[in-house]
Image: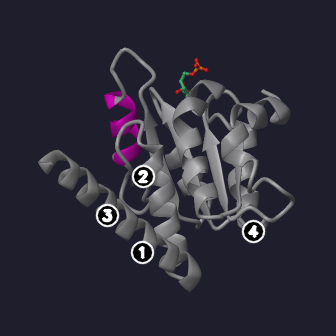
């Protein structure tokens, strides 16, 4: 899929942050069919002004590209990778095997097994090669976890995460109050 097509699919999510700054987070996925799920990670990162890039990189269909993406990510300035895939989801684990960067895996519900196959493929990594795995189709949490991890070395970003938590709490309180009226 062409970059232009990808960007138009991600229109509102990418419009703020896609200028030529070095991406801190790489969002990769096994197929363009994963994009409706993975775009939530881009939306969160853009909300927090974290520069990111979105790429299709398949462990099975483009293994050489996966290899070069993972090996070059760190020297390009990428600090963390979010990788989503469905079915026999090898992408996050293979990328984690090739780079010292933290990898967050997003299991995508893509097959007859409703995403359980993908979840187990991603979460059941062998000892020594971790992938931080979020819930099936929950790329929002992948984005939020990425913000928290980058926030450890970025006080402004962590402050924005604290504000997000306060806003989330206030939102629940407002809804609860409305219900009581
Ligand atoms: C996986 O196979 C992809 O990550 C996707 O979730 C699934 C189906 O891919 P398509 O057949 O839709 O391209 O590799």
Give the secondary structure at mark 3: helix
Residue 101 falls inside the magenta stretch: no
Q: In whole angstroms, how far apart are the C-alphas of marks 1 and 4? A: 25 Å
* Residue 27 % position (x, y): 63, 48
- Circles 2 and 3: CB atoms closer than 8 Å: no
- Circles 4 and 3: CB atoms closer than 8 Å: no
Please tell me how crowded label 2 is: few (under 14), some (14-19), or many (20+) other residues with Cα within 10 Å. Answer: some
Give the secondary structure at mark 2: helix
Q: Which residue is mark 4?
A: 77
- Does 15 sit above or below residue 80? above
Could you say which quadrant of the image residue 173 lies in? bottom left
Can I make out residue 7 in this image? yes
Q: Which residue is mark 1?
A: 162
Q: In whole angstroms, how far apart are the C-alphas of marks 4 and 2? A: 23 Å
Q: In whole angstroms, how far apart are the C-alphas of marks 4 and 3? A: 36 Å
Q: In whole angstroms, how far apart are the C-alphas of marks 1 and 3? A: 12 Å
- Circles 1 and 4: CB atoms closer than 8 Å: no
**Which of disc 4 and disc 1 is earlier in sequence?**
4
Can I make out residue 154 in this image? no
Could you say which quadrant of the image residue 107 lies in? top left
Q: Which residues are magenta?
A: 116-123
Specify the quarter for ligand 1.
Answer: top right
* Residue 68 % position (x, y): 76, 50
**Which of disc 3 and disc 2 is earlier in sequence?**
2
- Circles 1 and 3: CB atoms closer than 8 Å: no
Image mark for residue 141: 2
Give the secondary structure at mark 1: helix
2 or 3: mark nearer the eye:
3
Instruction: Count the labels in the image.
Output: 4
What is the residue that sits farthest to the left in this orientation?
180
Q: Which residue is mark 3?
A: 170
In percent of the image, x 56 and y 75: which residue is there? 157
């Amino acid at each position: 899929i062409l970059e232009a097509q990808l960007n138009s699919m991600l229109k509102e999510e990418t419009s703020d942050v896609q200028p030529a700054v070095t991406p801190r987070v790489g969002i990769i996925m096994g197929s363009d069919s994963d994009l409706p799920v993975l775009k939530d990670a881009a939306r969160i990162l853009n909300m927090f002004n974290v520069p990111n890039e979105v790429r299709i990189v398949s462990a099975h269909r483009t293994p050489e590209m996966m290899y070069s993406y993972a090996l070059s990510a760190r020297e390009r300035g990428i600090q963390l990778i979010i990788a989503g895939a469905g079915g026999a989801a090898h992408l996050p684990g293979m990328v984690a095997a090739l780079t010292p960067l933290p990898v967050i895996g997003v299991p995508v519900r893509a097959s007859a097994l409703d995403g359980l196959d993908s979840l187990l493929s991603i979460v059941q990594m062998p000892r020594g090669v971790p992938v931080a795995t979020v819930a099936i189709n929950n790329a929002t949490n992948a984005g939020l976890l990425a913000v928290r991890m980058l926030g450890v070395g970025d006080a402004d970003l962590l402050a924005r995460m604290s504000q997000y938590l306060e806003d989330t709490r206030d939102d629940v309180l407002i809804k609860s109050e409305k219900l009581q009226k």
